[in-house]
Image (tube, grey):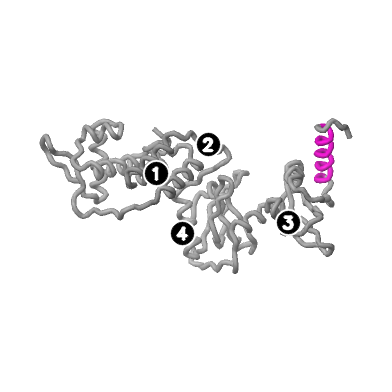
Amino acid sequence: MGSDSSPVSRALLALELVQGSPGISAARLAERLGVSERAARRYVSLLREAGIPVESVRGPYGGYRVGRGLRLPPVVFRADEALALVMAVLDGHHDASDPAGTVGGAIGTIIRALPGPVAAQAEAVRRTVTPMPDRSAVRPDPATTATLVHACSDGRAIRLDYRPESGRGLSVEVEPWSVVVRHGRWYLLCRSVEHQAVRAYRVDRVRAVELLTGTVVLPPGLDPAAVLEEHLAVGWAHEAEVLVDAGPEEVRSWLPRTLGRLEPTEDGGTRLVGSTNNPRWYVHELARTPMRYRVVGSAPLREAARALGRELLAAAGDEA
């Protein structure tokens, strides 16, 4: 059983089984759920407490069935859509095959609503593929994430109870712009009310959200992903300045935005301005570009570039 397993997820799975097999017995329901008959009856009771009309008929041909008044809209997918959805879930969640988990239960619901041939393909992919978990990914609390998304869409100012890596709690008032997922990490992109500056907060470190009365107006032409990338490139210990012998558009196609801001120079080149806590990583990223460039300014970055050059010369058999 996955770590996401809960009475609610089991009850929802029980509802799907009753809908799919009207007249299912308590024994059969328990078998499908992998629990005792007593537990299966408890899940049915949870559904009834939630206002879902689950009826029971006694006798050899009796069992559970959903009563009148509960209709779910049909779910229609093309085969390529269904497979793409399953692949996307597997790519992000290694526990998607656990039917008792939140993610596995959700994808199971979708598969059971598909036409037979499409469902068979989707289920085959889910059960056959063995995804490896992204160990750098951090999945935040779904309820907190939903609150932040609604605040962004409703244009509501919020106050965050935030606990950064240092462990010291913060209370910050912000104007939320967007929730952005980057390399398995979820960020709230926003403007700090106190500092009137762009900020990005890790959603998994948000402990509480308070909705405020203030309204939020998004910057014109906001590109949340681009703004987040540029924001993550500033404010680190070592300032970086790099001159590249190519225009900004060409440079942008080779270097990630996290390295900094690109500025055109008078001679048709580009100045890259950013910062980093890890000079070695920074110069290794720079080495991806085929254009000629020169690191200026920061002594730690220049030394890291020299060290990388010596490593490459040694790899080629030429000691510097």
The residue tagged 4 is: 150
Residue type indicated by callout 1: Ile
Query: Marks 4 and 3, how far apart in space?
Result: 37 Å
User: Residue 7 in the image: x percent, y percent?
Assistant: 33, 40
- In what element is the residue under mark 3? helix
Identify which residue is drawn at 80% across, 59% down: 269
Mark 1 or 3, nearer chain start: 1
Residue type indicated by callout 3: Glu
Q: Picture quarter containing residue 166? A: top right
Task: Please state the extent of the stretch shown in magenta in the rendering.
Answer: 300-314
Direction from residue 260 to residue 62 in the image, left or right: left
Residue type indicated by callout 4: His
| Marker disc for residue 107 | 1
Magenta stretch encompasses residue 121: no
The relative height of residue 147 versus residue 43 in the rendered view (above or below) is below
| Marker disc for residue 133 | 2
